[in-house]
Image (cartoon, rainbow, N blue to C red):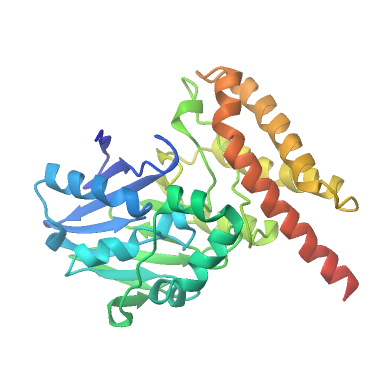
Amino acid sequence: MKNTITHLTDGITVIDAHYADQGIACIYIVVQASKVMLIETGTSYSVAYVLAALDELKLTPDDVDYVIPTHIHLDHAAGAGHLLDLCLQAQLVIHPRGATHMINPEKLEAGTMAVYGEEKYRKLYGALKPIEEQRVIIAEDEFELDFNGRQLRFLDTPGHALHHFCIYDLLSHGIFTGDTFGVAYKQLASSNSEFIFASTTPVHFDPDALLESIDKIISLQPKYIYLTHFGMIKPTKKIVSQLIQSIKAFVAIAKEEKYSIQGRVKRIEKKLMLYLLEQYHKTQGHASLAEAKKLLQMDCHLNAQGLDIWLKRLAKKREA
């Protein structure tokens, strides 16, 4: 089992969740006065990597105080119940819209299985485990958590998902942004910049809300952004501009297809890929265009599905 561990600043360690492939999703281990907070959980298969990383840090599951998925999409939260079973002192901190699904994950599992099919679902995520209600802390907007003297502020950040919060760590002056601040795979970085784009995966994409959430994050003037996909970046003006431009471009691509429903997801997916490859080519990233295309395939497919659902919601509003 290969475990990739990177030590960041202020007691923060990032490990690969090994979701779908290496370098796609990560988990943050935050250590404060010999106690642990896990931000994101990956899938049920990620648990072994968390345990190995804790052991390397000379810590145990009993040192874990909090397990915190930024939202309940399963690349972020499928391992939560498994970790709570092992980390007996830990509590789950979750967005109010996600709590019910963590306590009783049957509908969440069934809904995801309906999208992927059972075989692919099991391969990607394994199985979900319920979490006892008394071990769940619900974090509303502006909720503050004292983690052994380390202050964390939770920010409601819809746009990617209605059940999404970001976590402002006042010690490192960084924000754990889940999917709200987009995707920036290290494989696509250039020598002087990241390559970043929005995540519009099903089913709650709302461009106006997402732009407002990004504004909320930037207004705090964070020193670091801790992405789930993937790792720490600095929110430079160039990065923020690139992220916002991707949202606007994705919306424009979707709107071009709003009156033609048959085969729409595939057409949007193709246009997203063309757009991202064109933008990537401008950055002079280290990976080849063929490598970039392979890496971006899953994102383009899921983003196209999310944009299609958003178009359907707009159509219903027009008909109402």
Taking depth in this image into account, of 218 and 127 the one nearest to the observer is: 127
Indicate the position of residue 158 as horizontal and vertical percent values.
57, 64
Question: Outermost residue, bottom direction?
Answer: 134
31 lies above or below 288: below
Q: Nearer the viewer, residue 138 or 120?
A: 120
Q: Quadrant of the N terminus?
A: top left
Whether residue 94 sits left or right of residue 304 in the image: it is left
> Residue placed at 35% from the left, 67% from the top?
129
299 versus 205 height, above or below = above
Measured as percent of width and height from the top left, residue 104 is found at 42, 76
Horizontally, residue 135 falls left or right of residue 108, namely left
Residue 163 x, y percent position in the rendering: 52, 67
Using the image as rendered, state which of residue 125 and residue 192 is in the foreground: 125
- Residue 113 image point, x, y percent: 54, 59
The residue at the point 83 percent across, 69 percent down is 316
Q: Residue furthest left?
A: 58
Asked whether residue 172 is in view, the answer is: no
Along the horizontal axis of the image, is 132 left or right of 225? left
Q: Quadrant of residue 18?
A: top left
Q: Is residue 252 left or right of residue 238?
A: right
Query: Is residue 138 visible from the viewing direction of this image?
Result: yes
Number of numbered discs visible in the structure rendering: 0
Instruction: Kindly identify the residue that appears in the image at 41 percent across and 71 percent down.
Output: 102
Q: Name the image quarter holding residue 231.
A: top left
Is residue 209 depicted above or below 138 in this figure?
A: above
Which residue is rendered at x = 72% and y = 40% of the image? 269
Quadrant including the C terminus: bottom right
